[in-house]
Image (cartoon, grey):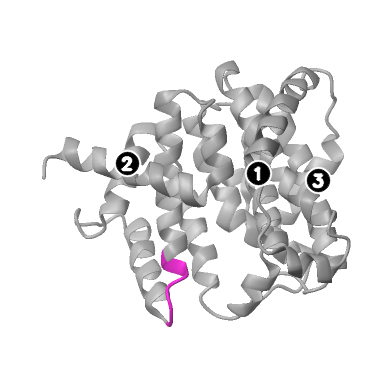
Amino acid sequence: MPKATALKQYVTAANKLLSTYGKSFHWARYFLGKETGLQATQLYAFCRYLDDIADQPGNLGAKKLKSIQNIFNNYSYQTGSYPEVDNFLLLRQELDLPVFAVKDLLEGLISDQETVLLLNENQLIQYSYKVAGTVGLMMAPILGISSKKAIPFAVDLGIAMQLTNISRDVLEDSKNNRFYIEKNFEKISSTVNLANRYYQDSFYAIKSIPISFRFSILVARRVYRKIGYKILKKKNLENYQRSGKIYVSNIEKVLETFLSIFDLISLYLINKNEDQIQHNHILINEEINLNERI
């Protein structure tokens, strides 16, 4: 099959994945422009591919993830073994995406292959960095973020979104022996509030994104944050259990998109709290030296 045809088929499949499994990102992608939106979709498809492998039964997922991990650890790979990896490597070469981010991501996904029991907030943040903050690192070149001071805040947005996922999926995760947080509403609520700290920190990086992309990131940030607010409105575990998986409706997305206009204005008016932001990054640095990765 010609490369151009294969790439077109891959892009079509990636768009379908995004519209099915990443509804909030799919909505925000429309504000990125055609080329950047396509690159972001390709990155999402690769990360989704790895995530789907991690969800495979038995030890199938672990074996495949470790095989892919060896590709990035040894820089030795025969193209064609994993078409999704082939497409990602092309994207990485085009944009110089950080390979250590992929290594950290794979490490996080591999840790999910056995019973997961996170014991404290530090472990929760470090895990969230590995499986989602790393995506922020890889998105930075796609969005044209060149300032090293801004990149940690892209990590913050990834962490915030993962904390939102964890807060929303407590029941589903527990069925798969993944206990990221305790199954009680007090802990779920505190995790949503923790996510909000990272959403707030991520806000300051947006000034370093090229103007044409800022609104899209503000929309994605606000739409995903809305999930957390909807969780808090459940008030107790019984209501939370009855609600099923929480999503943001299309009407709510339109409203959050409109409100993002005010975020764009306030972006230039709010001062950042350097001490608090530094504290949040220290939690990551206790296991992973973030400074070496930017």
Q: Which residue is mark 2?
A: 12
Q: State the quadrant of the N terminus.
A: top left
Q: Is residue 91 magenta?
A: no
Q: Is residue 61 visible?
A: yes
The disc label shown at residue 249, or none: 1
139 on left or right of 97:
right
> What amino acid is labelled 1 in the image?
Ser
Q: Distance from label 3 to label 1 (Cα)? A: 24 Å
Q: Quadrant of residue 124?
A: bottom right
- What kind of residue is marked 3? Arg
77 vs 29, left or right, is: left
Q: Are marks 2 and 3 in contact (CB under 8 Å)?
A: no
Q: Mark on residue 171?
A: none
The image quadrant where one finds the C terminus is: top right
Quarter holding residue 58:
bottom left
Q: Which residues are magenta?
A: 53-58
Mark 1 vs 2: CB contact within 8 A: no
